[in-house]
Every structure is written in structure tokens, then in C-alpha cells.
Image (spheres, helix red, strand yellow):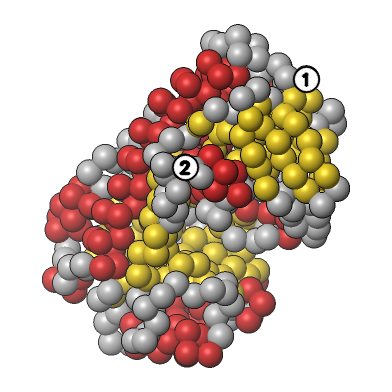
């Protein structure tokens, strides 16, 4: 195994998984640098993991049944029709997924990182510099040398900037032209949760967008209602917003979409979301031309930003860690391990980003006439949109 000193930039789900992979790969020292000083476990958004992906990640030792989850079995699609409470169902598709709450999932992963790993919160990394024999990492406290630096620092990655300072300097995420509004709150806030079954993921579709609603665990034995609404911003907002806060015209636009596009039950559900439980997420497309260069490696959103339609975010970060550990197990140096990791994950990232674009076109940018659809038409639509089967059924191994 490669050994040596390893730095992980970013301490979220991707960073914890990368630290675990580096430790298992025989690194003599692992240090995680996280810019946030607060509790990452307080983040409360939802994510979903396909049963097949869960089985792979459980076998690799990154997920297990002790982590709080809710099992889903079906995805029911609705359109608004008159005063029908939930809307009119147009079809149902299998949905063999487990849902998680980001915060409790992070807390479980963090607890599995060995005590020998140093975790420095409130420590932004100012720069990373590649060297012939490793890399240097600079913070406000000074500069340190490492044999490997792993960028798990999100779509604005400092490590990626260092890795692609030369011929790939223009390699950065591009705004896709539309937004996701997200929210989550305790289920007991719903006046009547009865019409919405625990095992159901609701897809409420309309011209130019849709909202996904499913339950997630709260980490304390209860449930939260988690929703994500995708649609274009109002006219005049051509650039990606610089804030995650839905205020002013963007919040007003969300209110209009909810009022005019959603059936009563789902509209009321979104209105129950408190302002501090609501945030925006601009859609970006990006996949790094390389996942590793020299002594620098990328993982999670630092490497590939796929639109959330794929359900790829945290899952892909965990898969990256599995691949990094597997590559290291077959190598004697980090350079050998990173060459294999680069070959494997660069192709996988490109595939996932392409899937995100295809699903974005089908579900937001070029939506069909949903009201004319029935079960067979919906099944045909989804086969075309999810041609790889990565989201709705069979998934890529990596």
C-alpha cells in the first residue's frame, strides 16, 4: 500500500469518505481541512441511494444498516387537475431507494473516521501547489508538504484550481440555466400526512419543471418532509444566483410556480417550509478532464457536478472513495494508484454528467405534454430519458 502523508481538503461526506479511503490505503498520516467552523451535522437536506448502489457501498464498508434511512418502493407521478388534492396520477414506476438525511449521514461517516485522522475545522485552505515529490498546502497557519492532496472541496474546489492551472485552466462548472429550490421540515407539521404514503416518492410534473417529494429520517427516530422543485428562474435572471438564499424576485417566483402549477396538497406542503429551511441550488454541469494529476486527486463535486436529477451527489462521492481505496490496494505508490483511479473515475464522471444533462432536458428544459400521458406513455418516456438505467433501475457499477 502507498503510505505517506495525505491531506484531504473538505470535510463533508466526500471528505470523510476520502479520509477513510486514505487511512485504509495505509497512509501513515491523514489530515482533513474543513473551512466551516460550525456543525456540518446540522445540514438537513435529503438524498436517495438506489438499493443496488447501497449493496455495493455496504460491501465496501462505507454504508451500513445502522445509518438511519427510510425505504421507498415506488415513484408516483402527478399532474395538477382541478381541485384534486394530490393531483391526477399519470403512472407509477418502481423506486427501490433508501433515503437519508445529509446531516445524520455525515455524522455516521464522521464517527467511522479513525481517531488517528486529524480533523481541522475552521481551517480554510488558501492554496495548493503541486511539486515533483508531492504537493504543498497553505493555510493561515503556514505551509505543509504532503505526498497526496485529495480535493473533496466541492464545485468551487481550490485543489481543482491547482490541478488545472495549465492546459485545463478553463475547466470549471457551467451554469445550466435553471434552479432547484429545496426544503425540509418535520413531517408532524403537515395537517394530514395520511394521503402521502411513507414508501412513496412523489413526482409532481408541470410544463418546464417538476417537484420531487419524499420523506427522510431526522436522525432522532422521526421523519422530515423533503422536497426539491426544479424550474427556470424568472425573466431577467440569466446568470446563476450568487447566493443560496431564496429572497426577493426569486422567492416570489417560487410562490407563483407553487400557486399556479402544483396540486393543493403539494402546494401547501411547500408553503409550510420556514424561510430558514429553504434554499436555492443553481444547476451546473461539469466533469473534470482528469481526476488525478501528479500528487493531486479530485473526488465528489470537486471532480464532477451532475445535476441532482441523477441522485449522484453523495453517492458518487462514496463511489469515488471506494475506487480510490481499490486502486491503492493494487499499487505500491500513490502515483500508481492515482493513474488507475484517474482512468476509472474520469470516464464514470463524464457518464454521470451526461446523464444529468439528459434528465434535465427531459424533466425541465424540454418537457412533454404531461397531461396526455398514461402508464405506458410514462414508461416509454422514462426509458428514453434514463437510457443507462442509472437512476430508475440498473446502475453503473462505479
Classify residue 23 as left or right of residue 304. Answer: right
Classify residue 212 as left or right of residue 105. Answer: left
Residue 312 image offset from top left, x and y in percent: 45, 46
Q: Quadrant of residue 307?
A: bottom left
Classed neighbour count for the residue bearing mark 2: other residues with Cα under 10 Å, few (<14), some (14–19), many (≥20): few
Q: What residue is disc 1 on?
A: 28
Quarter of the image for the C terminus: give it: top left
For the residues labelled 2 and 1, the Cα–Cα distance comes to 31 Å
x 25%, y 61%: residue: 361
Q: Is residue 6 above or below residue 16?
A: above
x 42%, y 44%: residue: 168
Which mark sits nearer the N-terminus, 2 or 1? 1
Mark in front: 2 vs 1: 2
Q: What residue is disc 2 on?
A: 166
Residue 319 image offset from top left, x and y in percent: 51, 33
Q: Report helix, strand or loop for mark 2.
A: loop
Q: Is residue 322 visible?
A: no
Q: Is residue 286 visible?
A: yes
Q: Is residue 229 above or below residue 299?
A: below
Amino acid at each position: 500500500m502507498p503510505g505517506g502523508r495525505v491531506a484531504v481538503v473538505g470535510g463533508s461526506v466526500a471528505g470523510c469518505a476520502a479520509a477513510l479511503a486514505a487511512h485504509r490505503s495505509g497512509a501513515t498520516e491523514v489530515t482533513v481541512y474543513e473551512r466551516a467552523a460550525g456543525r456540518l451535522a446540522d445540514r438537513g437536506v435529503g438524498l436517495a441511494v438506489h438499493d443496488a448502489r447501497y449493496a455495493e457501498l455496504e460491501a465496501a464498508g462505507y454504508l451500513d444498516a445502522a445509518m438511519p434511512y427510510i425505504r421507498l418502493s415506488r415513484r408516483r407521478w402527478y399532474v395538477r387537475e382541478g381541485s384534486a388534492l394530490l393531483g391526477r396520477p399519470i403512472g407509477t414506476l418502481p423506486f427501490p431507494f433508501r433515503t437519508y438525511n445529509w446531516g445524520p449521514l455525515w455524522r455516521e461517516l464522521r464517527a467511522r473516521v479513525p481517531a488517528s485522522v486529524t480533523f481541522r475545522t475552521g481551517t480554510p485552505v488558501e492554496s495548493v501547489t503541486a511539486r515533483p515529490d508531492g504537493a504543498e498546502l497553505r493555510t493561515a497557519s503556514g505551509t505543509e508538504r504532503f505526498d497526496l492532496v485529495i480535493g473533496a472541496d466541492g464545485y468551487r474546489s481550490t485543489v481543482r484550481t491547482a490541478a488545472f492551472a495549465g492546459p485545463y485552466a478553463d475547466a470549471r462548472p457551467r451554469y445550466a440555466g435553471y434552479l432547484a429550490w429545496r426544503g425540509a421540515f418535520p413531517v408532524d407539521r403537515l395537517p394530514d400526512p395520511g394521503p402521502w404514503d411513507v414508501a412513496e416518492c412523489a413526482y409532481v410534473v408541470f410544463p418546464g419543471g417538476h417537484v420531487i417529494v419524499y420523506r427522510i429520517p431526522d436522525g432522532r427516530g422521526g421523519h422530515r418532509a423533503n422536497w426539491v422543485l426544479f424550474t427556470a428562474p424568472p425573466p431577467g435572471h440569466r446568470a446563476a444566483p450568487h447566493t443560496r438564499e431564496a429572497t426577493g424576485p426569486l422567492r416570489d417566483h417560487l410562490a407563483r410556480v407553487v400557486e399556479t402549477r402544483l396540486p393543493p396538497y403539494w402546494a401547501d406542503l411547500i408553503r409550510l417550509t420556514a424561510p430558514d429551511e429553504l434554499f436555492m441550488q443553481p444547476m451546473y454541469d461539469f466533469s473534470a478532464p482528469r481526476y488525478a494529476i501528479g500528487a493531486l486527486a479530485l473526488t465528489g463535486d470537486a471532480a464532477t457536478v451532475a445535476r441532482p436529477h441523477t441522485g449522484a451527489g453523495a453517492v458518487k462521492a462514496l463511489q469515488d472513495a471506494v475506487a480510490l481505496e481499490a486502486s491503492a490496494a493494487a499499487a505500491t505508490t500513490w502515483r500508481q494508484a492515482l493513474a488507475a483511479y484517474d482512468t476509472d473515475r474520469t470516464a464514470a464522471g463524464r457518464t454521470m454528467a451526461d446523464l444529468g444533462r439528459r434528465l434535465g432536458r427531459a424533466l425541465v428544459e424540454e418537457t412533454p405534454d404531461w397531461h396526455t400521458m398514461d402508464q405506458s406513455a410514462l414508461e416509454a418516456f422514462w426509458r428514453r430519458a434514463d437510457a443507462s438505467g442509472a437512476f430508475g433501475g440498473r446502475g453503473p457499477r462505479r
